[in-house]
């Protein structure tokens, strides 16, 4: 994943939970890190999708493909 690049949901991400991502380009903003008070660090990933900021965990990244110009 590269910050500033566009990604799109691949065929591997067909689960209904991700329907709002289907067919829409998502701009990758990079890691979104949470440092909890108990010392645990959580690394999420931020995107812009449909004009809104969305946060995912790393398991979602494998369902995204780079959006190549046609």
Image: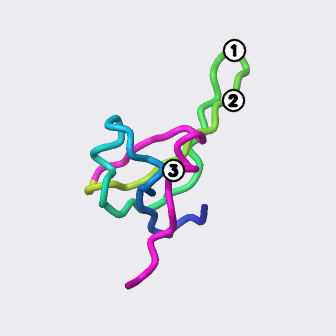
Q: Quadrant of residue 2?
A: bottom right
Instruction: Compute the Cα span from label 1 to label 3.
Output: 31 Å
**Residue, disc 2:** 41
The range drawn in magenta is 52-70
**Residue, disc 1:** 38
**Residue, disc 3:** 63
Q: Earlier in the sequence, mark 3 or mark 2?
A: 2
Answer above or below: position of 12 versus 34. below
Q: Quadrant of residue 33?
A: top right
Dot 3 lies on which element?
Answer: loop
The residue sitting at 51% across, 68% down in the picture is 66
**Image position, residue 6 (x, y; %):** 45, 68
Q: Are marks 3 and 2 in contact (CB under 8 Å)?
A: no
- Quarter of the image for the N terminus: give it: bottom right
Q: Residues within 10 Å of mark 2 (few under 14, many from 20)?
A: few
Judging depth in this view, the residue of 67 and 54 nearest the camera is 67
**Image position, residue 14 (x, y; %):** 38, 46
**Image position, residue 48 (x, y; %):** 37, 55
Task: Residue 62: say if magenta.
Answer: yes
Q: Are marks 1 and 3 in contact (CB under 8 Å)?
A: no
Answer above or below: position of 14 versus 68. above
Dot 2 lies on which element?
Answer: strand
Q: Earlier in the sequence, mark 1 or mark 3?
A: 1
Judging depth in this view, the residue of 63 and 41 nearest the camera is 63
Answer above or below: position of 41 versus 3. above
Residue reaching furthest bottom? 70
Instruction: Compute the Cα span from label 2 to label 1.
Output: 9 Å
């Amino acid at each position: 994943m590269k910050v500033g690049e566009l990604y799109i949901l691949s065929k591997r991400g067909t689960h209904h939970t991700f329907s709002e991502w289907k067919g829409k380009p998502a701009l990758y903003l990079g890691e979104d890190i949470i440092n909890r008070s108990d010392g645990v660090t959580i690394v999420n990933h931020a995107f812009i999708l449909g004009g809104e900021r969305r946060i995912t965990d790393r398991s979602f990244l494998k369902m995204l493909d780079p959006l190549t110009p046609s």
